[in-house]
Image (spheres, helix red, strand yellow):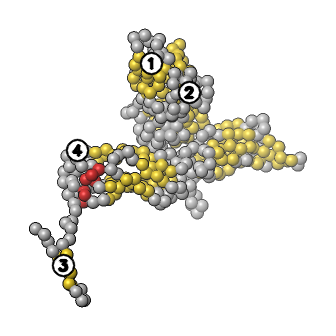
Amino acid sequence: MTLHETYTGPDRTYTISPDPRLAPGRLAQSIVSVQLLDEHTGQPPSTEVVAQSAFPLVTPKSTVDGLAGLTGFPVRAMPLLRNFPCDVDFTVRARRYLPFQTTVHFVNQGSFPDTFAPRDLGQVRLHRESTVLRGRVVRTTATGILPVAGATVSVSGYWVSIPSPAVVVPPNAPDLVSLKPGIYIDRTAGTAQIRRRDFIATADVSELIDDAPAGSTSWRISNRVGLAPGEILRIDSSDADRTEYVIVDTVTGTSLATQPAQVTLRYAGRLDHRPTAHIERVTLAAPGPDNAFVSDAVPGDAVALAAGLTGIAGASTVEIDDGAAAPEYHAVSLFSVVSDSNGFYRLPALNRTGQLELTINDGVNPPIIVVVVPNYELDQNILDIALN
């Protein structure tokens, strides 16, 4: 039955037949939304954010205020939501930030499309891409500026959030380690642990046959001698900037183990590797003591914020494990270096810290303390330090 409505104005009367009110699930609307903030400033990113999704029939949207989401007609994008759950991939990227990547799970909604509950992910704090802090330690003398060799430059404290100048906030203890490459998967504070883990190389070696770009989960290698699911491979051990430890998930090949084989990896590699890259099968030595994470880590983080560094001093490699997902392995560096004969120093890759306290000690004069706010818009920060 057609419904009519009558409206009377000052000089005429209108009779209309309005369209029926659509069910919420049939209306164009926000399906997923999130507010993105810089973890150091608490403010929206100063650069444009770009939302992405491969899910069909949704439109990514974003604003300069750090708002991002997916819009569309729910009944078209998720027509079976009444009876079946639905997973929607969602990624947001911004320049010089690590991407926010998640899968948004919609449980089945029994009254859909008469009702629809969108997903608001709330506030998410983006982590910065890493930067490097380097410079020169010098001393001003009566005869000019001279380099200071052998000066120790150390991170002696840090703040994740940049504190207000009006408030005195003591720094966190400098229990942070630099990882190479960055974190492979999300790791949660309270469950994730970091500990020293040395490796012993075996006699089983092979080499890469094809390119293995960062993000690849499958490698073609020259042989599968000694390989089985769960084995650990070290690739490019002669190049510290490309060395990576990966876990074999599956291995397939001919009946001869000495022939080329295909391996799939538990986690996608984070570094680029070229054909002929040297591959070794390694075994684990006894683990060191556990140190808990004090802050969640996301894929790509170059720094782990720990509750302590017990057993890690002097380590070259560490294991990160949460007791649920497979562990991961990284080369490790601590944030304490010594200036060279020309006074130059370089700290390892850094993120997760909005403000740093550096202590510089030349072993002769009283140490000095410098507070630094890294500029993560740059891949390198230059900080020259003048001693008295």
Please tell me the numbered disc located at residue 261. 1
Q: Earlier in the sequence, mark 2 or mark 1?
A: 1
Q: Quadrant of the N terminus?
A: bottom left
Q: CA distance from mark 2 to mark 3?
A: 74 Å
Q: Tell me the residue at 68%/43% (across/down).
A: 134
Q: Which residue is mark 4?
A: 84
Q: Position of residue 286 (x, y in %)?
A: 49, 22
Q: Tell me the residue at 56%/55% (across/down).
A: 162
Q: Tell me the residue at 19%/51% (across/down).
A: 110
Q: CA distance from mark 2 to mark 4?
A: 44 Å
Q: As shown in the figure, which amino acid type bears the numbered disc 3?
A: Thr
Snapshot quadrant of residue 3: bottom left
Please tell me the numbered disc located at residue 274. 2
Instruction: Give SS at disc 3.
Output: strand
Q: As shown in the figure, which amino acid type bears the numbered disc 4?
A: Phe
Q: As shown in the figure, which amino acid type bears the numbered disc 2?
A: Arg
Instruction: Give SS at disc 4.
Output: loop
